[in-house]
Amino acid sequence: MRAARWAFVLCCAGAATPLAHAQDAASLRARYGALDGRLVSAEYQRPLYLESTMRPDALSGDIYALFDQPFAIVGPSLKDLDHWCDILILHLNVKGCRVATSRAGKALRVNVGRKFDQPLADTYLFEFQYARESQPDYVQVDLTAPEGPIGTSNYRIILEVVAIDPARSFIHLSYSYDYALPARVAMRGYLATIGRGKVGFSVVETKANGQPVYIDGVRGVVERNTMRYFLAIEAYLGALSAPDKEQLEKRLNGWFTAAERYPAQLHEMDRPEYLSMKRREVQRQQVPVPGRP
């Protein structure tokens, strides 16, 4: 029962041990140069490249994307921990998020749950430690949680941003986690039930009529959620130009509109349901918790 209860967390929580990240501006720019021809894709309707990897004990997803926004806006907006709850709450499965202080330093307490309204007591609470590397033209944010439910560990989200030219920035988002046998069993249960028929973004073959066949299974799960988190970052950045009082609604509508560009992968509910659910969750996370920093 416990494994079944938390199977959704394995499919939705951001996480860790990425196979590679650049760690400096020159390396990330080199990655941009290597991907330049593959960033132009009609499939994604934007300059974006997505890849996923499955190993015997770990899963990872990576998105690389070019933004028509200067690093002077993108870098400072994403490097500070205080902005990350505004980003993460846009994801369907994030039910709450608060900035906290732990023994190790700054952290995010993130509640992950199902794709509908839930009391926080019915969600799983992750505590992500926060670290960052900042250079004049490069930012890296590292969020790590050592433990998760039913045999998962080493949860990590990495975001890197580098200046490409005065008007554009290049972003790399990576997430993954390590998993043991109980998690593999739970994942099989999810894919056999509520996850059945869901697909990711990678095209594994093309039908005779030219229609793509998308990857499914565990890598499909990773790709869907990598994209959901990327769209949250994109929606956050896209709302910065609006007046402060209008930014929340712009973020929520921006995330939903972007997700609906990929209905086969990301459609879960209608816009009014999403907006209503997220407004309540945002309001809930703004209420002070007695005795908690």
Image (cartoon, rainbow, N blue to C red):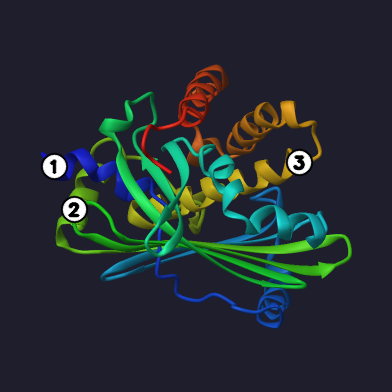
Q: Which residue is mark 1?
A: 2
Q: Is residue 204 above or below residue 211?
A: below
Q: Is residue 160 above or below residue 124?
A: below
Work out whether residue 149 or residue 30 is closer to the camera in this orientation and state it: 149
Q: Secondary structure at mark 2?
A: loop
Task: Estimate the x, y position of residue 4 in percent, counting from the top left.
Answer: 17, 41
Q: Is residue 146 visible?
A: yes
Residue at image coords 75%, 32%: 244
Asked if marks 2 and 1 touch (Cβ < 8 Å), the reply is yes
Q: Quadrant of residue 119?
A: top left
Q: Distance from label 1 to label 3 (Cα)?
A: 41 Å
- Amino acid carrying label 3: it is Leu
Work out which residue is located at the far right of the displayed protein and give it. 166
Q: Residues within 10 Å of mark 1 (few under 14, many from 20)?
A: few
Q: Which residue is mark 2?
A: 150
Q: Earlier in the sequence, mark 1 or mark 3?
A: 1
Q: Is residue 251 above or below residue 46?
A: above
- Amino acid carrying label 2: it is Ile
Give the label, 2 or 3, closer to the camera. Answer: 3
Task: Estimate the x, y position of residue 75 in percent, counting from the top left.
Answer: 72, 60
Q: Earlier in the sequence, mark 2 or mark 1?
A: 1
